[in-house]
Every structure is written in C-alpha cells, then in structure tokens.
Image (cartoon, rainbow, N blue to C red):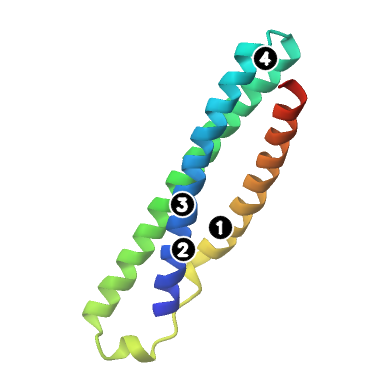
Amino acid sequence: MYDLHFEHMQWNNQLRFFKQEIEIFKARLGEVIQKNTDRDVMREAEHFQNSFILQNEQIDTLLHDIKMHETELVKYAKDHPIAVEHTYFENHNGLEERMGSFHKLYAELKVEFQRYVAKWL
C-alpha cells in the first residue's frame, strides 16, 4: 500500500509538471503564430492547440482518477487498520498502464512540437 501511495505522489508531481510545461508550449506556439502567417504554420498551430487541450484534459482525468484511488486506499486503511499491512493491492486499477500510455503519447507530442518550433522560428 505504501508503494502505491508513493507512486501516486510521483504521478501527481509529473502530471502537474506536464501541465506547466504545456503552458510554456502554448506561449511558444503564440510566438510562432506571431512571426508566421503561412497557412501551413496556422494549420499545424491549430493541430497543436487542439493537442494541448486534449493533453490537459487527459491530465485532469488522470489526476482525478489517482485521487479517487488514493481515497479508496485511505478508506480501506481506516476500515481495516490491521489487515492493511498484510493485504495485497491490485496495481492501481489500470492507472499504471494509463500513465505509461500517457507518457508515451506526451513524449511524442513534445518531440513533434519541438520540431515544429525549430522549423518555423
């Protein structure tokens, strides 16, 4: 249970960092848009704006689901204070896989965006 709690804390920190990083990406995208009026630039900019919105929504969903799982663990610990030390808990109810998928997709978006910025600035 303590390992699950530790992972929850790590994921929360990572997701909050990604949320801040997306704000930086949005500002950078604004710079690209200001300096370029080409249709291709604008079309790709719209793609990234939409992607950033989707990533933020995904982060919010993951943060919520992590909080809900943490709440379940705390409730179980309160209801079963002795058994909690000897109980095996399922590995995050699928959160670990979802975080892995999110990390992969986010990393791909980040690389794609960095290439875009390098191309147009």
Q: Earlier in the sequence, mark 1 or mark 4?
A: 4
Give, as a three-letter code, the residue at label 3.
Answer: Leu
Q: Earlier in the sequence, mark 1 or mark 2?
A: 2
Please indicate whether residue 38 sits to the left or right of residue 73 in the image: right
Q: Is residue 83 left or right of residue 7?
A: left
Residue matched to label 2:
10
Q: Is residue 70 above or below residue 38?
A: below
Image location of residue 76, percent across then percent down:
29, 76
The residue depicted at 48 percent of the width and 67 percent of the height is 93
Which tag, 3 or 2, sits closer to the chain's start? 2
Name the side, left or right, on which 76 lies relative to 5. Answer: left
User: Element at badge 1?
Assistant: helix
**Image coords of residue 78 (percent x, y):** 22, 78
Answer with the quarter of the image where residue 39 lies: top right
Q: Which residue is mark 3?
A: 62
How many marks are shown on the rendered structure? 4
**Sooner in the amino-acid sequence: mark 4 or mark 3:** 4
Labels 3 & 2 near each other (Cβ < 8 A): no
Q: CA distance from mark 1 to mark 4?
A: 31 Å
The answer to which image quadrant residue 118 occupies is top right
- Residue 42 - label: 4
Q: Residues within 10 Å of mark 1 (few under 14, many from 20)?
A: some
Q: Which residue is mark 1?
A: 99
Label 3, secondary structure: give it.
helix
Q: Are marks 3 and 1 in contact (CB under 8 Å)?
A: yes
Q: Amino acid at mark 2?
A: Gln
Q: Earlier in the sequence, mark 2 or mark 4?
A: 2
Q: Amino acid at mark 4?
A: Met
